[in-house]
Amino acid sequence: MPDFSVGDRVVLFAGTRVGSPGSFVALRPDPAWGDVRDPDGTVAAHPMQWVRHWREGHELPNTIAAFARNISPAGRPQEL
């Protein structure tokens, strides 16, 4: 799993909010979960396997399409 620092720009790649951008806040006591701040300022916990770094200039739909091609046979996301 990639390392995340406070303030890193991220995007959700799974769940009901696929494609939602945000900024990384912190890992939870269970490091499989982390907090992400939405653009509106709310903070929500998400499984870290759903969170990926997002860089300026990367189009979200293309990034998500690339991610979808990298789903393992078990349905688990693989690192890009």
Image (tube, helix red, strand yellow):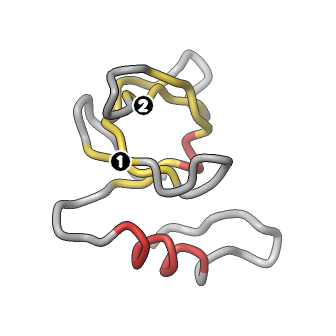
Secondary structure under badge 2? strand
Q: Is residue 48 above or below residue 52?
A: above
Q: In this view, does 72 lie above or below 10?
A: below
Amino acid type indicated by mark 2: Val
Q: In which quarter of the image is the C terminus?
A: bottom left
N-term-proximal mark, 2 vs 1: 1
Q: Where is residue 79 in the image (x, y as percent from the top left)?
A: 50, 67
Furthest residue in direction front, as rendered: 40
Secondary structure under badge 1? strand
Q: How far apart are marks 2 and 1 (CA)?
A: 8 Å
- Circles 2, 1 touching at the beta carbon (< 8 Å): yes
Q: Where is residue 15 in the image (x, y as percent from the top left)?
A: 67, 49
Q: In this view, does 71 lie above or below 45?
A: below
Asked whether, in this view, residue 14 is left or right of residue 63, the answer is right
Numbered badge on residue 41: none
Q: Which of 30 and 10 is in front in this view?
A: 10
Q: Which of 64 and 29 is in front in this view?
A: 64
Residue pictured at 55% horizontal, 41% vertical? 48
Numbered badge on residue 36: 2
Residue pictured at 33% horizontal, 22% vertical? 41
Instruction: Indicate the quadrant where residue 45 lies.
Output: top right
Amino acid type indicated by mark 1: Val
- Badge 1: how crowded within 10 Å, few (<14), some, or many (20+)? many
Residue pictured at 50% horizontal, 50% vertical? 12
Q: Nearer the viewer, residue 24 or 39?
A: 39
Name the residue carrying label 1: 10
Q: Where is residue 39 in the image (x, y as percent from the top left)?
A: 31, 34
- Badge 2: how crowded within 10 Å, few (<14), some, or many (20+)? many
Residue pictured at 41% horizontal, 73% vertical? 63
